[in-house]
Amino acid sequence: MKETDLYGPLKTYFEGQGAQVAGEVEHTDMVVLQGTYVFGIELKVRFNLTLVYQMLDRRGVFDGVYAAVPLVKGRLANRKKVLMLLSSLGFGLIGVDFFKKKTKVEIILQCNKKYNNPHGRSKRRERIIREINSRYAEFTPGGVASTGPRLTAYRQQSLHVAWLIEKKRIPGRASVLLANGGPTKGSSILQRNIHGWYSRESRGLYILSNEGKLALANHVKEIEELEPLWESYLSRTAQ
């Protein structure tokens, strides 16, 4: 079993309660937005001290922090000691039970809000919420290995800009891209050119570099999912 196996059942569970769920945000495996309540979840295939250390790092950022672990026939090893430890720290615990044809999510221990004061580190909290709300879609499940690129909000918006320039033949000027449904940060994306996807052709005008064309080729599946949304932005601006 992998940590990512826990993400799907948890995402389904919380979305079923009307919450917004995102994976791999600011080094947190899973973030759940439920109204004004924001909590982080760390996924582990077994409970250990590394998990506790990760949760301690999230304290003060979220309204609550949970550990999520798989259950074996509804049971958790050393359950009493685990609950005592987490309870003393104000953390919560979620168990995921895997059956042959279904999964069951159980909130074993609710986190104690009095231990979590996000206002002391509000900038990081705001950055997390902004990241989630700026994503077009969720592609990275929580619990994936820390290596390799992830489709963050910035990367998704950069792909949008590249798609407009290459696929829709929209001139690579920030104002023109914005007028055609491009992201509001289009100017910053072009000028900073973090990924090296764009080449400056003249003042304020950019074309796609070879790296940018390769990025589009490497994200075909994701772009196919995002295209209907991006097309809707184009149609709105054309009206």
Image (cartoon, rainbow, N blue to C red):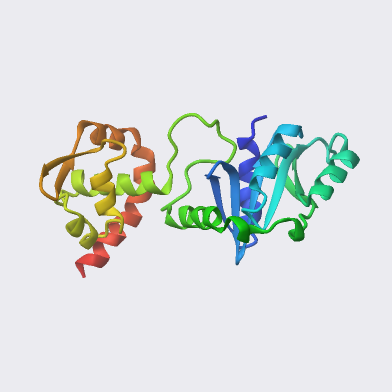
Query: Looking at this view, is 170 or 184 the one in front?
Result: 184
Based on the displayed image, in which of its 4 quarters is residue 34 positioned?
A: bottom right
Q: How far across and how far down the image is residue 30, in percent? A: 60, 46
Q: How far across and how far down the image is residue 52, in percent? A: 73, 39
Based on the displayed image, in which of its 4 quarters is residue 198 positioned?
A: top left
Residue drawn at point x = 42 percent, y = 42 percent: 151
Query: Looking at this view, is 197 or 10 the one in front?
Result: 197
Whether residue 219 is situated above or below residue 89 in the rendered picture: above
The answer to whether residue 152 is seen in the rendering is: yes
Residue drawn at point x = 15 percent, y = 48 percent: 169
Question: Going by the image, does 98 lie left or right of 190?
Answer: right
Question: Going by the image, does 53 lie left or right of 199?
Answer: right
Question: Going by the image, does 11 lie left or right of 184?
Answer: right
Residue drawn at point x = 25 percent, y = 32 percent: 211
The answer to whether residue 98 is seen in the rendering is: no
Looking at the rendered image, the quarter that the N terminus falls into is: top right
Q: How far across and how far down the image is residue 43, in percent? A: 66, 39
Looking at the rendered image, the quarter that the C terminus falls into is: bottom left
Q: How far across and how far down the image is residue 168, in percent? A: 19, 49
* Labels in figure, total: 0
In this view, the residue farthest toward the left is 202
Whether residue 141 is situated above or below residue 116 in the rendered picture: above
In this view, the residue farthest toward the right is 80
Whether residue 37 is situated above or below residue 40 in the rendered picture: below
In this view, the residue farthest toward the bottom is 239
